[in-house]
Image: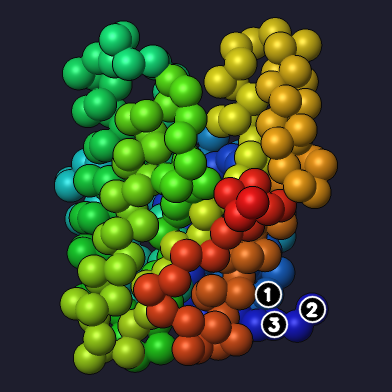
Amino acid sequence: MTQRLGGKIALITGATSGIGLATAKVFATEGAKVFITGRRQDVLDKAVAEIDGDVIGIRADSASMADLDALFAQVKTEAGRIDVLYTAAGGGSMLPLGQITEEQVDDTFDRNVKGVIFTVQKALPLMGKGGSIILTGSTAGTEGTAAFSVYSASKAAVRNLARSWALDLKDSGIRVNVVSPGATRTPGLVELAGEDEAAQQGLLDYLASRIPLGRVGEAEEIGKAVLFLASDDASFVNGAELFADGGQAQV
């Protein structure tokens, strides 16, 4: 183990599955004390049990101001500070133009934009010089994707939040960056194809055909990209978008 996060306090929201959970495992292996959140206590408890290291699970919905206040109060009591904040909570659904609903817009932007804004804002009093904030973008934020416009718009918003926050925080010594995964094998991705396993594999095969490396990503690979942005190796990286996409949005 390299212990690139030795002695660091990290908070990862939405870390009960997929990229968030994989990143929590990477962070713990690299020496961080990791707080993770999830909306369902049973799933959160299962995730904590999967992580080998110093980890604490706190039930919280990132779109709930009361949950966020309770979250940061507990982190302050138990750790006193946050060195690394990774906002992995979020998600979306597919509806083409003409079928978009108010409920879809509200749900997507609450999870991917509102939740990110207030998670970061409420974390700031616990962060200081050398701190690292990593937001979750997506290749969908720069590419057009049929029936995915609301999600794509929310991720484009996240990208610009990082640009502006890098300026807002210029005197604080806190860095803000975005990691933008391409198609990655996660429960959230395959569930877009429904519950049929053949349909799920068909989706993965189609997405792999669009990626220069010829395959979809694995959650741990994205976690390692987040690790770079979290670590002192990225001490002069700020306001940037790091694509971990196999070349998907680069060609």
Quadrant in which residue 60 is drawn: top left
Q: Which residue is drawn at 25% across and 71% down?
A: 165
The colour mode here is: rainbow
The residue tagged 1 is 30
The residue tagged 2 is 1
Q: In the image shown, does 204 or 186 lie closer to the viewer?
A: 204
Tell me which amino acid carries mark 3: Gln
- Above-or-below relation of 169 to 64: below
Q: Residue at x 58, y 49 (%)?
A: 249
Tell me which amino acid carries mark 1: Glu
Q: In the image shown, does 219 or 78 lie closer to the viewer?
A: 219
Could you tell me which quadrant the N terminus lies in? bottom right
In whole angstroms, how far apart are the C-alphas of marks 3 and 1? Answer: 4 Å
Determine whether label 3 and label 1 are within 8 Å by CB: yes
Instruction: Tell me if I can see residue 78 in this picture.
Output: no
Tell me which amino acid carries mark 2: Met
The residue tagged 3 is 3
Quadrant in which residue 51 is drawn: bottom right
* Image x and y of residue 231, in percent: 56, 81
In whole angstroms, how far apart are the C-alphas of marks 2 and 1? Answer: 6 Å
Residue closest to the far front: 251
* Image x and y of residue 16, in percent: 54, 42
Q: In the image shown, does 216 or 210 lie closer to the viewer?
A: 210
In whole angstroms, how far apart are the C-alphas of marks 2 and 3? Answer: 6 Å
> Of the residues under marks 2 and 1, which one precedes in the sequence?
2
Disc 2 crowd rating (10 Å Cα; few below 14, some 14-19, many 20+) is few
Determine whether label 2 and label 1 are within 8 Å by CB: yes
* SS for callout 3: loop
Q: Which residue is drawn at 32% across and 41% down?
A: 154
Determine whether label 2 and label 3 are within 8 Å by CB: yes
- Above-or-below relation of 108 to 14: above
Disc 1 crowd rating (10 Å Cα; few below 14, some 14-19, many 20+) is many
